[in-house]
């Protein structure tokens, strides 16, 4: 059966990427699709760029957030299949054809997800690290994913409307995680398709951009996870590996401090054991780093992952925990 696909794109100040996103979409080999862009009160040149392409443009008068913008786009669409992507994601020529094929194969009661390509559009080290890490993490349990990310989500229009769509009154991000959990509770099947990929434009110019992203995502993920009582679950980028990695970094700093305080070799031994155990647990990820960029990238990405990135993630966890406690106390 042939399905019409509606590609839904929320946009807010995405002038630097939305043109590339739409250019890639309209090079698609698929014949039956529409593109609905919901502009969430952009203050840059986004509108003028979007208007150059044959898509449906919904201009919002008030800033509503990404989740609500996605819902509005879905309500304005006409396709049987909704394909959610972000304004900084690029599809390939066969992506929409693959989306239709997957919908026909798995049926309309299955929600299908894709991930980022192993290599990002922008090839800075920090963007390359993030793309390889997300690609590995989201495909690790592709048959039984905990969530489907909205940067590449295929869902039937009927299912979307029946389940209420993304939570509009929610956190600024990870609305796709909440929606995925709600879908599963309602009996829908979630799967990840390894061949369904979009190329992401991260735009990370330096370490500060990367660490800021890690902090922000872990902060809001922690707020949601405490309320959802799944803090310790193996969930995509919030994986067992990353959680162990954060514990390993902060634990190793404590052990190193204790060793420097009294030079007791037991602390140095425990430090080595903790780091060694963390490396052993993450060997598959490190192999993925090697696949992504060879020996040099393996070395730099692994060192960054073990000794630097978990600092931002850990601080985000602390901030998220404090925010959750404060919110509960204000009720």
Image (spheres, rainbow, N blue to C red):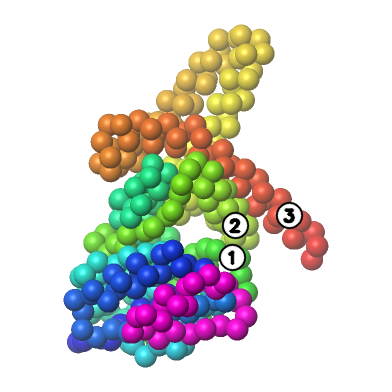
Q: Position of residue 143 (x, y in %)?
A: 31, 60
Q: Residue 83 sits in which quadrant?
A: bottom left
Whether residue 50 is in magenta: the answer is yes
The magenta span reads: 42-66
Q: Is residue 61 above or below residue 110?
A: below
Q: Residue 257 sits in which quadrant?
A: top right
Describe the element under mark 3 as helix, strand or loop: helix
* Residue designated by label 2: 220
Point 58% across, 53% down: residue: 216
Q: CA distance from mark 3 to mark 1?
A: 18 Å
The numbered mark, 2 or 3, whose residue comes first in the sequence reads 2
Marks 1/2 in contact by CB < 8 Å: the verdict is: yes
Label 2, residues with CA under 10 Å away: few <14, some 14-19, many ≥20: many
Describe the element under mark 1 as helix, strand or loop: loop
Report whether residue 133 is seen.
Answer: no
* Residue designated by label 1: 172
């Amino acid at each position: 059966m042939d399905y019409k696909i509606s590609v839904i794109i929320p946009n807010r100040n995405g002038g630097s990427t939305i043109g590339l996103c739409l250019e890639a979409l309209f090079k698609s080999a698929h014949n039956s699709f529409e593109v609905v862009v919901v502009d969430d009160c952009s203050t840059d040149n986004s509108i003028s760029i979007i208007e150059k392409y044959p898509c449906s443009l919904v201009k919002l008068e008030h800033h509503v957030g990404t989740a609500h913008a996605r819902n509005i786009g879905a309500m304005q669409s006409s396709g049987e299949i909704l394909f959610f992507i972000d304004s900084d994601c690029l599809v390939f020529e066969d992506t929409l054809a693959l989306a239709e094929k997957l919908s026909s194969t798995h049926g309309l009661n299955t929600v299908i997800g894709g991930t980022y390509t192993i290599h990002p559009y922008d090839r800075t080290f920090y963007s390359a690290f993030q793309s390889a890490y997300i690609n590995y993490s989201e495909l690790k349990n592709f048959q039984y994913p905990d969530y489907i990310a909205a940067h590449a989500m295929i869902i039937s229009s009927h299912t979307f409307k029946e389940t209420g769509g993304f939570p509009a009154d929610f956190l600024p991000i990870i609305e796709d995680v909440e929606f995925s959990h709600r879908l599963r509770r309602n009996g829908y099947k979630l799967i990840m398709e390894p061949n369904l990929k979009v190329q992401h434009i991260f735009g990370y110019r330096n370490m500060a951009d990367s660490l800021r992203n890690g902090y922000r995502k872990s902060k809001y993920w922690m707020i949601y996870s405490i309320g959802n009582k799944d803090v310790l679950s193996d969930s995509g980028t919030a994986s067992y590996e990353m959680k162990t990695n954060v514990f390993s970094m902060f634990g190793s700093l404590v052990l190193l401090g204790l060793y420097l305080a009294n030079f007791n070799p037991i602390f140095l031994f425990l430090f080595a054991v903790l780091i060694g155990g963390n490396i052993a647990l993450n060997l598959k990820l490190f192999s993925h780093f090697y696949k992504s960029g060879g020996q040099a990238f393996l070395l730099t990405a692994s060192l960054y992952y073990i000794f630097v990135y978990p600092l931002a993630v850990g601080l985000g966890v602390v901030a998220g925990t404090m925010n959750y406690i404060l919110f509960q106390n204000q009720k």
